[in-house]
Amino acid sequence: DQQVKQNSPSLSVQEGRISILNCDYTNSMFDYFLWYKKYPAEGPTFLISISSIKDKNEDGRFTVFLNKSAKHLSLHIVPSQPGDSAVYFCAASPRGGGNKLTFGTGTQLKVEL
Amino acid sequence: NAGVMQNPRHLVRRRGQEARLRCSPMKGHSHVYWYRQLPEEGLKFMVYLQKENIIDESGMPKERFSAEFPKEGPSILRIQQVVRGDSAAYFCASSQKGGVSHRGPTIYFGEGSWLTVV
């Protein structure tokens, strides 16, 4: 059962525009949600996280929004840059589950010039 | 300040051989996690270890897979009698504490070990 879902395998955006990556989850016991960025042949790099008690967290060009009633979160990148081209993974941590993360299948973002 | 170190980065094994993947956590970290990424899939949790203890192995396949984190030396993920379906990227991560910080889970991933079974 896929508890964290990223339904868009790929997204293409023009440089300077906003990139919106979406993630849905089914487990209401998730406590934290995280976004990771991954380049080919490298490990995931932490981008930004949000606690389940919040609905927004911002860090520079990256903002994560959480809609608990819809069990949906999104990552906004603005403005998008060519260096943002990578695979983005949504992940979730259950209450009391510590660092045991459940990952989505990823969205390949391509930022075009 | 070295990050999480994994080796080998790439490993090719014939069916039936053994694969050993090593992971040295970040300095000061005593908690290690192994995740596996099959082609076209997300990372999946395999096992969580502290020094000399397996804390959670709920994601480990029941047979052929084992993990250890000895008092001295790196953590080892061992796959016996490999099959083609074991071909994947294996990521190790480490954390200072087992629980989340006030910012949430804080684990740092290594660059991965790519296992190819031929």
Image (cartoon, helix red, strand yellow):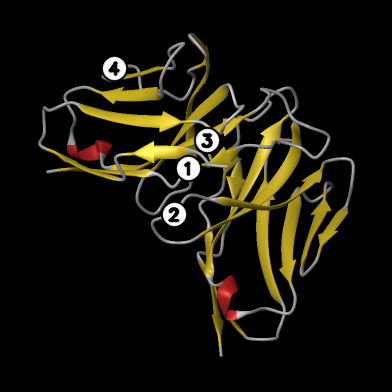
Mark drawn on residue B110: 1
Report the amino acid beneath label 4: Glu
Which residue in the structure is indicated by mark 3? B93
The chain that hosts pointer 3 is B
Rendered view: B19 above or below A36 = above
Badge 4 vs badge 1, beta-carbon distance below 8 Å: no
Report the amino acid beneath label 3: Ala
Q: What element carries label 1?
A: loop
Badge 3 vs badge 4, beta-carbon distance below 8 Å: no
Q: Which of marks 4 and 1 is nearer the N terminus?
A: 4
Which residue in the structure is indicated by mark 4? B63
Q: What's the CA distance linking mark 3 and mark 2?
A: 13 Å
Q: Earlier in the sequence, mark 3 or mark 1?
A: 3
Which residue in the structure is indicated by mark 2? A42
Identify the residue at image location x=84%, y=60%.
Answer: A58
Q: What's the CA distance linking mark 2 and mark 4?
A: 28 Å
Q: In this view, does B97 lie to the left or right of B35?
A: right
Rendered location of residue B7, percent (x, y): 33, 38
Furthest toward the front, the residue is B1
Q: Is residue A35 left or right of residue A1?
A: right
Count of labels in the image: 4
Q: Say whether residue A12 is visible.
A: no
Whether labels 3 and 1 belong to a single chain: the reply is yes
User: In this view of the protein, which residue sits in the foreground, B95 or A8?
Assistant: B95
Q: What's the CA distance linking mark 1 and mark 2?
A: 8 Å
User: In this view of the protein, which residue sits in the foreground, B35 or B98?
Assistant: B98
Badge 3 vs badge 2, beta-carbon distance below 8 Å: no
Rendered view: B7 above or below A62 = above
Identify the residue at image location x=56%, y=48%.
Answer: A104
Q: Which of marks 3 and 4 is nearer the N terminus?
A: 4
